[in-house]
Image (spheres, helix red, strand yellow):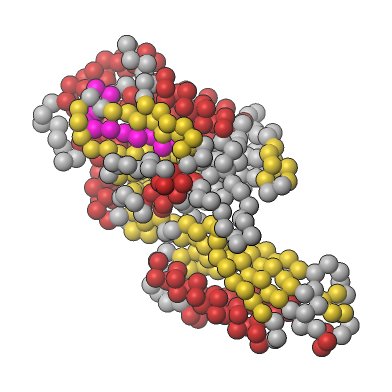
Amino acid sequence: MRPALSRLSLAATLALGTAAALLSAPARAQALDAAGLQAIDTAIQGVAAKMVRWRRDIHQHPELSGQEVRTAALVAQHLRQLGMEVQTGVGGTGVVGTLRGGRPGKVVALRADMDALPMPENTGLPFASQAKASYLGKDVPVTHACGHDAHVAMLMGAAEALAGMKAALPGTVKFIFQPAEEGAPVEPDASGKVPSFGAKAMVEAGVLKDVQAIYGLHISSNLPSGVAGYRSGPLMAGSDNIHIHVEGRGGHGSSPWAAVDPIVAASQVVLGLQTVVSRQLNISQEPAVITIGQIQGGTRYNIIPDFVEMMGTLRTFDEGMRQDALKRITTTAEAIAASSGAKARVRFGPVAYPVTTNPAALTEASLPALKLAMGGKAAVIPKVSGSEDFSEFQKVVPGFFYFLGAPPKGKDYRTAPPNHSPLFDIDEDQLPVGARSLAALAVDFLQRP
């Protein structure tokens, strides 16, 4: 008996046998139907309790970007037990499981991210994280405040369900467990650069070889429970880190005329940058956001420093607007600093995520299966100004990304603590829903002519 089937109840095994007959028939060239979904759902329900255990275990033992050793080992062991070809150390700590179906066909990929965040957890859950790790040279608390623990558990569940249907699958499914979605695992070098990480590193390692489409989801506490949120075209913003070094000339605070005050110049740069969006970009085309979130300068109240360092972020939904904004940010900062006798040096990176964009053709083709898997609970949502490096996969192959609503039970999705909050939590009843939707999208893609 195959490893996956040994974990299923007799009823589930019989249901999968029926599905195999349906899927292997020559007439099953069309997309996923209700009978196929029922087989997937039966298999998913067989691993529903496991997904909760996996999620809680991973939640209690979170790991920062590039440090996902324990999580990767858990995933690799599970995939091997399912009889898959397993690669480890892909793009860092990434894991890839390959499930080859019983019949030839296309290749589709499903992706989950594994890393946690350097922040405390205040949920009070019995399995709340107490973990600490080193981040940029400091010991920090670590928690899964973005739901990646749920993403891993759901994809592990989808992998077990589809492994049980291996003989019926007309093609190959790759299960991609990605590290370092939250950012670079190392500090920039002297030039401000870091090695490739996350999705980009996995792409460079060849993870998308032969893949024709990729699917991924992100759990959210700010959508109604059990609802899939999607949109065709730009879904999530591209993101660029902004670093501005404003150099003046230090002096005594009592005699600013004998110095060039970089703090005043930096303050004017912050205000001037807001006009890039409000007055220089055509935001009737797409929205954009510029935020300066960090300013460091000076050592004492009466000393004018030599320089000020500023850090911020640019969010855009169009590559042309992005390139235009990068130029305007540089010009604005340099000109404003020069007007007071200071100098501004602007650089971008090391993090630069492209726009997460769902191709219209893949979106349209995938929606019937998504809506079927969600029981019709799927809705178009507004653009999201957060960023996702799933976009790196979409640069290479067509990719469809969507959100799954899962506010904690008893919480209104409109006021529930959002992702990246120390109070963030989810409704674990949605784990099977997410796994079912991923599995359904994969099977649907393989079955479509």
Residue 317 in magenta stretch:
no
User: Compared with residue 389, is residue 176 higher up or lower down, i.e. above or below?
Assistant: above
Residue 409 versus residue 87: which sits nearer the camera? 87
Residue 254 versus residue 435: which sits nearer the camera? 254
Residue 282 occupies quadrant: bottom left
Instruction: Give the side of residue 196 with respect to residue 128, left or right.
Output: left
Query: Which residue: 30% across, 55% down?
Result: 359
Q: Can residue 415 be spotted in the picture? A: no
Residue 396 versus residue 75: which sits nearer the camera? 396
The spot of residue 441 in percent (x, y) is 30, 39
Look at the magenta stretch and give its main secondary structure: strand
The spot of residue 325 in percent (x, y) is 48, 73
Quarter the C terminus occupies: top left
Q: Which residues are magenta?
A: 166-177
Query: Which residue: 63% across, 70% down?
Result: 244
Quarter the N terminus occupies: top left
